Amino acid sequence: MSLITNVMDHSLDDGYAEAAALRKSQGAGGGMPKTLRAKLGLAGGLVLAALVVTVGAAQARVAAPAIAKERQELIDRIDRETETADKLESSVDRLRDDVGARQRAALRQSGGSEMADLVGILSGAAAVHGPGVKLVVNDAKEASSGGDGNPRTTAGFSDTGRVRDRDMQRVVNGLWAAGAEAVSVNGQRLTALSAIRAAGDAILVDNKPLVPPYTVLAVGDGNGFSARFQNGADGLYLHALEENFDVRADISVVNDLQLPAAPSVIVRTAQPSTEKGTS
């Protein structure tokens, strides 16, 4: 109790009281400066600080319109370039349609219109429709990005439930092997030159990034087509992903699928042969 009483009676340490008394006796107490020189120094400091603040505010006010103008110019430029790109894309689509129409007309004159249609379907250059299967593949509900790039070997579940590019490659190849006549992934028509790759955690189809869920449409002979895929090696692989890693997949038979045409296929190397075959 004596310790508590001492603390209550001497809440401020005696050393503080002695130091305050010493400063007071030496004339070093707080407050405004006492001498004229000190007052002039303080006034000069205040004037300098006010000058710095004023100059900074003036510079900011002068620079603000210029920055806003540059920003607006960049926005306008982006809008113009986007509009130009959209116009060019529309022009490419019109030219593609015109070229296709001219090709069909030329082949029709030579009696080869059916062959032209078949080539357009097989190459992916023509939009198609018909019966087939709709396969929706999605990441596991608890999946997230991360890991060392090999989700099948990491211990944490966060990496094992993601659909990877190699998974989509097997799914698409399995559909082709089962008899698909045309395939698209998230609206991207696949051709003989299409590539399914990865960029980080994203899946790219022909260099265009996709986001889950991945909707794969494949034109084929309906129920038989679906059964062949599911009973094949790649269909069983997809089923194993469902069972072991909770990857979600749903397949259904659709009476009439609509698949878009692929962008123009540019042939850079192959040339038609002019040599006649020998017997």
Image (cartoon, grey):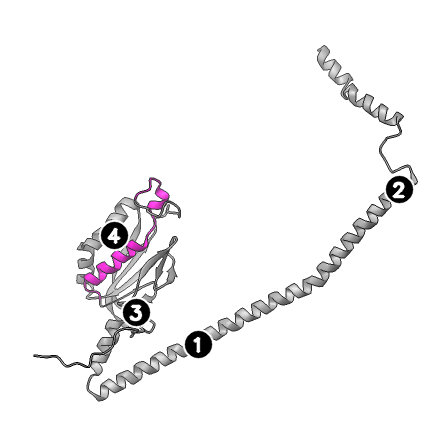
Q: Residue at x 30, y 46 (%)?
A: 246
**Residue pushed farthest top?**
2
Find the distance from the CA under tag 3 to the CA under tag 1.
23 Å
* Residue 18 locus on image (x, y percent): 82, 21
- Left or right side of 75 for 173: left
Q: Which residue is mark 4?
A: 238
Amino acid type of disc 4?
A: Leu
Q: Residue at x 20, y 64 (%)?
A: 222
Q: Which residue is mark 2?
A: 39
Find the distance from the CA under tag 2 to the CA under tag 1.
73 Å
Compared to residue 125, the image places residue 145 above or below, namely above
Q: Quadrant of the N terminus?
A: top right
* Magenta stretch, residue numbers: 153-180
The tag on residue 259 is 3
Q: Which residue is mark 1?
A: 88
Compared to residue 106, the image places residue 183 above or below, namely above
Q: Residue at x 33, y 58 (%)?
A: 197
Find the distance from the CA under tag 1 to the CA under tag 4.
40 Å
Q: Classify mark 2: residues with Cα within 10 Å, few (<14), some (14-19) or many (20+).
A: few
